[in-house]
Image (tube, coloured by chain):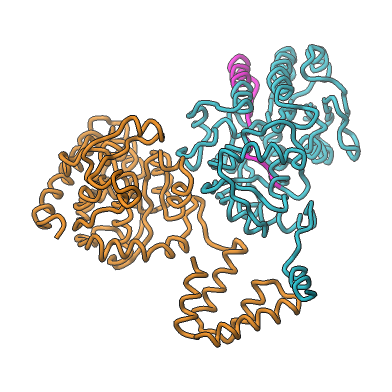
Chain colours: A orange, B cyan
Amino acid sequence: MSVEDGQRTATDGGGADAVAGFLRGMREGIENGLGPLTAARRAAGGLPESFRDALDRTAERMRGDYAEDEWGFDPEFADAVTPAFEFLHDVWWRVKSTGLDNVPAQGRAMLVANHAGSLFPFDASMMTAAIRLHHPAPRWPRFMVLDWAFGLPFLSSFMRRVGGVPANPDNATRLLEQDELVMVFPEGVKGTGKPFSERYRLQRFGRGGFVEVALRTRSPIVPVAVVGSEEIYPKLADSPSLARMVGAPFVPITPTFPWLGPLGLIPLPSRWRIEFCEPIDLSDHPPEAADDRQLVFDLSEQVRELIQNKLYENLVLRGSAFL
Amino acid sequence: MARRIVVTGISSHWAGELARRLERDPSVELIAGIDTDPPAPELERTEFIEADIRSPVMSRLLPALEPDTVVHCGFLWYPAPGKPDRALHEINVIGALQLLAACEKTPSVQSVVVRGSAAIYGSEGAAPFFFTEDMARRYPLKTRFQRDVGELERYFDNFARRRPEVSCCMLRYQPEIGPDIDTPLVGYLALPVVPTQLGFDPRLQFVHSSDATGALEAAVRNPVRGAVNVAPSGAVSLSRILRMAGKPTLPIPHPLFGPALTQLGRQLRMGGTYNDGVRLLRFGRGVDNRRLREDVGFEPAFDAVGAVRDFVEKSAGRQLVRVPGPRTVADVVARR
């Protein structure tokens, strides 16, 4: 990724002479017995600074000298893919976010949102983009991903590197104990797999496991309402036989998929609104309250109702879905 | 109190290292090693007893030694040329049964320490990223080795229930790495070009070999009850390991990876297919080591990244095949 960046800046700034000079320097370096990366770095002396930085970064990555935490989250990689998500955020879906002040700038917190769209958690990426772009103290949130994605090639390693972890209470608990910002989608596959006709109608919030985790780790819950994600892949029907064949929880039939082939995977450019609501403070309850089923169900229902109301409010505020 | 310690599988690297460390301790009165193969020659006062732990002779042998501690290192992890999958099962399961039967007849035994495996947790894509000791058997046991570990743990659990006065410690080891050891996974990392599974980048934890012995010794000295994960802190992805080692990789589609690994078997010094390795190198596995640090009181000297770095630095000369460096390539180009 950084190599491409580097080359782009070089041609923008230095021009052909600089590149030729760099290649000459590199050859001399290798002839003098330097490793290719060291030689490249020496030779880059005459090049624009951005290119030198990119080269340094590449060399560090090639040696394995990069930050990757125990969850496999790689901030440099996440930074590198950010432009793609910024494009989706600013241009494609024209996301408008409100209430970002409700996301704590530090310390643990659980963001609880409605889940829609499809198998790729675009709602999580847009919430991340909103926090990264507009929050006064941008931080990298971690998000819970449908188990199924973690058994797949490419998708599994991609998700992990940008901060995703398989959705289970153990992972959520450990992340919150490490004072991270964790996004959970209690609707799970019931939310993403519901037909277009049921859009913005919240499904059951699992068994309230997210409340248990929040109580046990004494983390505030920030309810989030995401409007727009329901229109990106309007699911008209389902193909259970195809789903069984590929081992997916469901395979959506949309107006464009599978009719247009891979082109049908392009999400529709709906207009989005994301509202981060006021945190629900659970610190009055002792951690043992997590074993109180009634309390857990009540809190879960309270969060669900709040998000449902905010969804309706934001639907009205958004107006037309696509224009 | 003078301690009398019996170690099974004394020919293995781990048992040998443990015995070497225990030999230095004057309070250990007897170290007896049981195995079919002789131990490393440099052991001085370890008594080697040539016996097969699968044979009923164990029930007469063990009470005569009057041990207070039995360390079971005779559990084999990897199929080897002379010991294919099936032999492994025999040794691992029948051996454990005979050993426990012998322990039942030995009233002097106060603690049993087993070098088991974290394979009991399995390697699953959607698993918790850090298994704690109470999360065993969340997933069905898929490979033969996993089922062997499952049986081993069940026998020891039953034994611990029947003999509550004996403290039974099951150490669940993540795979080891180190410049001084020779396992299929170490061999895999030492390949000149390392095949990986296309699109998969597992999170791994390798225990540094010195920490592995250290944890075993700590568990012998401070026997705790129940299972204890033996792993470094943190985790490291395979792609990062290979970059740190400076190895070129060859990504191949994952259905072909198992057969490819079997083909490489000779170079990796293993017999038969190593299914656990294939799954581990696809989905990875992470475990939590809090119990090891807090209850056993052993702080691993290397974290996940440190263990790999130490291995890479100290085994730089171990390359099996010389890869032409950029300088050689430049020479060749210049000569043309």
Q: Between residues B259 and B152, which one lies in front from this camera angle? A: B259
Percent position of residue A182, x then y: 35, 50
Residue B123 placement, left or right of B210: left
Residue found at x 81% / y 39%? B25
Up the image or down, A158 lies above or below A190; here it is: below
* Image quadrant where residue B21 sits: top right
Q: Position of residue A162 (x, y in %)?
A: 42, 55
The answer to whether residue A113 of the structure is visible from this angle is no
| Front-lying residue, A131 or A198 | A198
**Image side of residue B280 versus residue A175, left or right:** right
Q: Quadrant of the C terminus of chain B?
A: bottom right
Residue at 47% across, 64% down: A76
Q: Is residue B317 above or below residue B130?
A: below
Judged left or right of residue A276, residue A57 is right
Residue B333, position as x, y percentages in the image: 75, 72
Q: Is residue A48 above or below residue B6?
A: below
Q: How many marks?
A: 0
Q: Is residue B126 magenta?
A: no
Q: Quadrant of the N terminus of chain B?
A: top right
Q: Residue sitting at 38 percent across and 36 percent down?
A: A248
Q: Nearer the viewer, residue A76 or B162?
A: A76
Question: Is residue A146 visible to us here?
Answer: yes
Viewer-nearest residue: A211 or B77: B77
x and y, in percent, of residue A308 in the image: 15, 44
Residue at 32 percent of width and 50 percent of height: A265
Q: Magenta stretch: give its range.
A: B153-177
- Location of residue A236 by image quarter: top left
